[in-house]
Image (cartoon, helix red, strand yellow):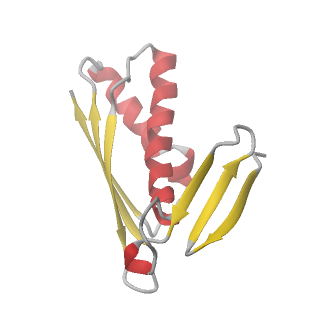
Amino acid sequence: MIPISLSYRGELRCAAEHGPSHTTLITDAPVDNQGKGESFSPTDLVATGLGTCMLTIMGIVARRDGVALEGATVQLEKHMTPPPRRIARVVMHFAMPVGIPSEARAKLEHAARTCPVALSIHPDIAIEADFSWG
């Protein structure tokens, strides 16, 4: 169990403190939903959590298998539905570093697609990921 403390700051803004590290992040409602859009929205964090989880699990597999993953990047787009608002799909474009052996690629893609966040997201949310290999 990881304790996280949340507080409402007013003006549709919240703060979240990660218990073990005391790192704080701020969320803000997006402009298209009455907010100021000055920070990540809660649904932005869901999509960001997905992308970073995919990279993290790929990193675990890469480290275990002696593959250099440093420099991998992801460009992510979150698409919302009209009201009632929910995440409809997350589109990710992975740019992988040069030099990853072809035999490691399928294993890394599988690791990404089966990360804990991907497995936790409702199946009605489309997860689209493509990989460019150096």
Q: Position of residue 58 (x, y in %)?
A: 45, 32
- Please report the residue visible at 74 percent of the width from the left and 56 percent of the height from the top: 5
Q: Is residue 13 left or right of residue 32?
A: right
* Residue at x 47%, y 28% (from the top left corner): 59
Q: Outermost residue, top direction?
A: 66
Query: Along the horizontal axis of the image, is 132 left or right of 110?
Result: left
Q: Is residue 122 something one can see in this rendering?
A: no
Q: Nearer the viewer, residue 62 or 107?
A: 62
Q: Is residue 38 above or below residue 24?
A: below
Q: Is residue 124 left or right of residue 23?
A: left
x, y (%) of residue 66? 44, 13
What residue is at 38 percent from the left and 23 percent from the top?
Answer: 69
- Give how far across and how far down residue 34 sits, in percent: 45, 81
Q: Quadrant of the C terminus?
A: top left
Q: Looking at the picture, does residue 28 appear above or below residue 17?
A: below
Q: For residue 97, which quarter of the picture?
A: top left
* Quadrant of the rendered image containing residue 72: top left
Q: Quadrant of residue 88?
A: bottom left
